[in-house]
Image (cartoon, rainbow, N blue to C red):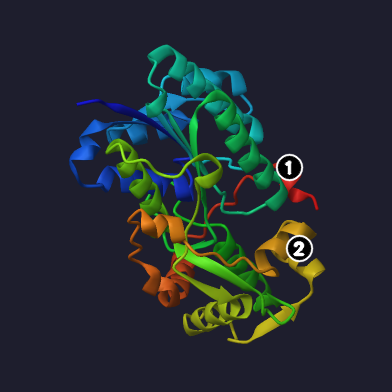
Amino acid sequence: MTTRSVLITGVSGYIGGTILSSIREAQGPWTAQLELAALVRSEHQASTVLKLGVKPVMFSSFDETELLEKIAADFDIIIHAGAGWHTPSAKALINGQNRRKTKTNRPEDIYSFEKYRESREAYHQRTTDITVVETGEAVGVTTHIVMAPTIYGQGTGPFNRYSIQLPAVIADAVASGTVSVVEKGDTVWSHVHIRDLAALYVTLLEKICNNVTVPSGRRGIYVCETGEHSHREFSERLARAAHELGALPTADVMEINLKQAGDKLALGSFSRAELSFAANARTKAVIGRKLGWTPLHGEEWESTFRIEVEAFMKNPPAPKEIPQFLKKN
């Protein structure tokens, strides 16, 4: 049986860690092909993934593009679930896979996955997405881009199990005593459970390992969703859950303007606040469902607010390191 070496980046994060655990839990003969590796930054992370039967690959920063290109040359499939906003690293990983394609003479077995990062900085991510597609086409590496809307639910990875958007609103609400909503909150976002998002990666990986042709490149941009919500609904559900649990003195929500939202929820970034809390982002996962992606956790949307508030109160997530340029408008 042909083996497939798979490198996963971002395993210390919410999405990458859940993708890793979901692949490890996957069933079927195709899983016997997989040799899993994870890109990690510390000895602690390395020892943790090693105990899971996953080979650790050490690096320090996504700025180390020469090292990343060298690392990528050793893998058939790369699932890049870390730093989706970082264009140079994405390009380096694809160029490294081009080197592998040349070395192994197996171009049909070289794949690169890109995630749409959860914090959704539109310009930087769009630049990366375009670069991924164009670089892949130029060097003959098959690429797939997975785009996610609001992601909810507790992750299943070995490290961080928190998302960004909901904990940020919870933290602000606990600090201020009230859940905020931008203006009337009538803008609408799609949403997906973290485990259903990871399941889409598993579906794609299974198809590839079974030699099924799936859309790639310009046609290989996959969205995923299991429902949608208005931002007012989001805030009201959170306020009710937090009030019932005694975390807030009231279940009312407070309307704020976009500048206030930037200061309170987006590190002072007007554009990120608008995109994440005051814009429409409605999608339909047509291609994924045609491939057999079957989400199982869509009905957990209503209960996720209480679960995440409880988890936040018991163990508040550590502050995340945010790239400097994402702190600007």
Relative depth, front residue between 136 and 57: 136
Residue indicated by mark 1: 324
The image position of residue 189, as x and y in percent, is 59, 69
Q: Does any portion of residue 228 appear in the rendered image?
A: yes
Q: Above or below — where is 228 with respect to 13?
A: below
Residue indicated by mark 2: 262
Residue appearing at x 73%, y 42% in the figure? 324
Left or right of 20? Residue 259 is: right
Q: Which quadrant of the view contains residue 218?
A: top right
- Mark 1: amino acid: Gln
The image position of residue 292, as x and y in percent, is 32, 56
* Sequence-earlier tag: 1 or 2: 2
Q: Above or below — where is 99 with respect to 177?
A: above
Residue appearing at x 56%, y 63% in the figure? 167
Measure the C-alpha gap from mark 1 to mark 2: 15 Å
Relative depth, front residue between 120 and 259: 120
Left or right of 133? Residue 267 is: right
The image position of residue 173, as x and y in percent, is 63, 73
Residue appearing at x 76%, y 63% in the figure? 262
Q: Above or below — where is 99 with respect to 321?
A: above
Image quarter where the N terminus lies is top left
